[in-house]
Amino acid sequence: MNSLWAIVRKDFQLLRTDKVTLFFTFVFPLLFAGLFGNMMGGGGSKQIKVAVVQQDQTAAATAFVQTLTDADELKVQAMALEQAQNAVRKGDLTAYIVIPEGFGERYDAVFAGKAPTLIVGVDPKRTAEAGLLEGVLMKYGADRFTKLFSSSDAMREQMQKSLAQIQAADDMPAAWRDLLNDYLPKIEQLLAEQPAVEDNTGESGFDGFTPLNIEKQEVIREQKGPGHAQAVFFPQAIMWATLGCIMGFGTSLVQEYSRGTMLRLRAAPITTATVLAGKSLTCAVTIAIVIGTLLIVGRTVFGMPIETPALLALAITGIAVCFSGLMMLFAAIAKTEQALNGLGWAVLMVFAMIGGAMLPLFLMPEWLQNVSHFSPVKWGILALEGAIWRGFDVQEMLKPVAILLSLGLIAYGIGLQRIKSLDAAG
């Protein structure tokens, strides 16, 4: 039994001396769980993103727009009509709300018999969001009733406005005009005889008017994703294969140091930089071969369309350079195979999670899309998707490829300098 506990103590002492392995054994799982839980639990905004097109510039219309802007349920952007329609069509916004001419006049005239009209443009397939938005609009449209019937002064003012509009309405039947002209002044007189009541936000119990008249316009949303399922899955599969490839080469490089192979190579008439460059080049070529093989399988076996095949060479080059450089950096930081596996897979799993290797980029919530900019996996997938189904031109492809090349060269340079410094230190 004493021998058993001695072995346990020895293993824990070895673990304690390897700081990288210690961190990724005890600390990183907690960070990973927190990040993954936040991803699966949402974290994005629950507000409905809408555009407001204010065509009526009256005070009442402006006040209603401000009410919508302040609403907790909505995230409002002011736009021109054409801009709003394009934003909804592209899926950037859920809907647009048009405040047409005449809205403010009807909004103020509660007793005129016509509810103010809003025009709402939304994709007919998004029935849940449309229903929720309509409920929100009705809620804030009904606020004027609550304010009106909780204040006698406000109600008297509204009576006077309504009487003026009734007198000016040429299309109102004479019988209705006579009835309202007789009825509304009497109500106004009764209100004037009541003691003043302070405004409050309590329930008025009034439910006899329609808050708003909502006219819906259908806006067919453009397809944001690919038309072929394999066009989503193959870029993800390619990135997972790439991650596995660099971990394999990184492990072999660490093994060559730990087993003395690098010492024997350095005895030959070649520099350390040449040896490491050869290792990195082999990794890059292997990545390119793996990617090419998977793309051929996807095209020939699964019928995956490729919109711009000529740009695939740029995408593959960027990915190969980037991740072979990361391989060199990981191998330079880790001193043992165990440390490399802990460091490498931990970092790469985070890159994969936020970079679109688990959840497709075009389905990510907005907050996660912003975070994904820090992941080279995101730029690798974007470059592949740009050639496979996004229809990138050369200029659009240059951005992800340039980022991949820059990351790869920087990582390779840092890794090379660290290995040289370790060799010099003996």
Image (spheres, grey):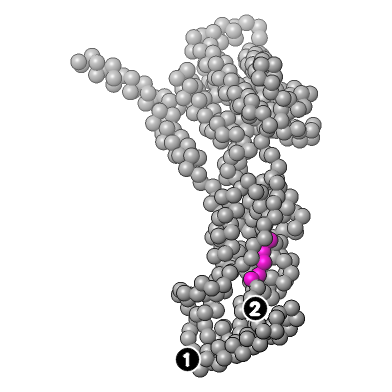
- According to the image, label 1 marks what residue? 195
Q: Residue most toward the front?
A: 175
Q: Position of residue 309 (x, y in %)?
A: 76, 23
Query: Which marked residue is nearer to the observer: mark 2 or mark 1?
Result: 2
Q: Is residue 336 magenta?
A: no
Q: Position of residue 375 (x, y in %)?
A: 60, 34
Q: Which secondary structure is most common in the magenta stretch?
A: strand
Residue drawn where x is 71% and y is 30% of the image: 389
- Give the left or right position of residue 304, taking residue 210 as reference: right
Please name whichever residue, 158 or 340, is drawn nearer the observer in this view of the structure.
Answer: 158
- Give the left or right position of residue 152, taking residue 235 as reference: left
Upstream in sequence: badge 2 or badge 1? 2
Answer few, some or many: residues within 10 Å of disc 2's Cα (few below 14, many 20 plus, some between 14 and 19). many
**Rendering quarter of residue 64:** bottom right
- According to the image, label 2 marks what residue? 112
Question: What secondary structure is marked by label 2?
Answer: helix
Q: Position of residue 66 (x, y in %)?
A: 62, 67
In the rendered image, which quarter contains the N terminus?
A: top left
Q: Is residue 135 above or below residue 286?
A: below
Which numbered circle lies on residue 102? none
Residue drawn where x is 65% and y is 78% of the image: 112
Q: Amino acid at mark 1?
A: Pro
Q: Position of residue 115 (x, y in %)?
A: 64, 71
Q: Is residue 241 above or below residue 219?
A: above
Q: Is residue 99 above or below residue 331?
A: below
Residue drawn where x is 55% and y is 20% of the image: 244
Please name whichever residue, 9 or 111, is drawn nearer the observer in this view of the structure.
Answer: 111
